[in-house]
């Protein structure tokens, strides 16, 4: 069984690494009670990023009340199942603004939980859409 904190940290580091690879200066925040995972600098100012990671094609837990319109959310599907790792499949990234999450009603409710489904983000509007971020 995989530790939830390990999954979240993997997502944060992967997103920070991908941003740095694309030319953004980044700073990762640490702690359990934070609302911003990563700060990145762009030509238009500092970006606030929340990284959400998952190991399976289910959903990413996130509540409607915690969405900030001016923040970017980057969801990472780690693809860490044994058969996928053997094939060396890279993580999948989905880039979306808080404003989009709210305006497109992407948060669903299941019994007592809320989240965003992998199937709702797995399309050309969000998958690998790094160009939604202002340039570094």
Image (cartoon, rainbow, N blue to C red):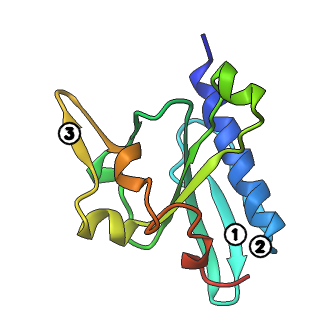
Q: Quadrant of residue 39?
A: bottom right
Is residue 116 left or right of 104 when viewed as pictured?
A: right
Q: Nearer the viewer, residue 95 or 91?
A: 91
Of marks 1 and 2, which one's residue comes earlier in the chain? Answer: 2
Q: Which residue is mark 1?
A: 40
Residue 22 x %, y %: 78, 71
Residue 116 x %, y %: 35, 46
Dot 1 falls on a residue whose secondary structure is strand
Q: Please identify the quadrant where the C terminus is shown.
A: bottom right
Of marks 1 and 3, which one's residue comes earlier in the chain? Answer: 1
Marks 1 and 2 sit apart, C-alpha to C-alpha, by 6 Å
Whether tag 1 and tag 2 are in contact, CB under 8 A, the answer is yes
Residue at the image point whose x is 62% and y is 18% from the top? 3
Outermost residue, left side: 111
Q: Quadrant of residue 90?
A: top right
- Res 109 label: 3
Residue at the image point whose x is 59% and y is 63% from the top? 128
Residue at the image point whose x is 60% and y is 10% from the top? 1
Marks 2 and 3 sit apart, C-alpha to C-alpha, by 34 Å
Q: Which residue is mark 2?
A: 24
């Amino acid at each position: 069984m995989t530790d939830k904190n390990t999954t979240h940290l993997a997502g944060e580091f992967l997103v920070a690494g991908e941003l740095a690879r694309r030319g953004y200066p980044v700073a990762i925040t640490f702690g359990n009670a934070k609302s911003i995972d990563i700060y990145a600098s762009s030509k238009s100012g500092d970006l606030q990023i929340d990284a959400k990671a998952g190991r399976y094609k289910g959903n990413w837990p996130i509540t409607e009340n915690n969405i900030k319109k001016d923040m970017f959310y980057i969801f990472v599907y780690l693809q860490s199942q044994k058969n996928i790792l053997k094939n060396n499949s890279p993580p999948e990234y989905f880039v979306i603004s808080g404003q989009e999450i709210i305006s497109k009603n992407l948060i669903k409710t299941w019994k007592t939980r809320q989240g965003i489904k992998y199937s709702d983000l797995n399309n050309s509007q969000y998958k690998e859409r790094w160009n939604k971020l202002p340039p570094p």
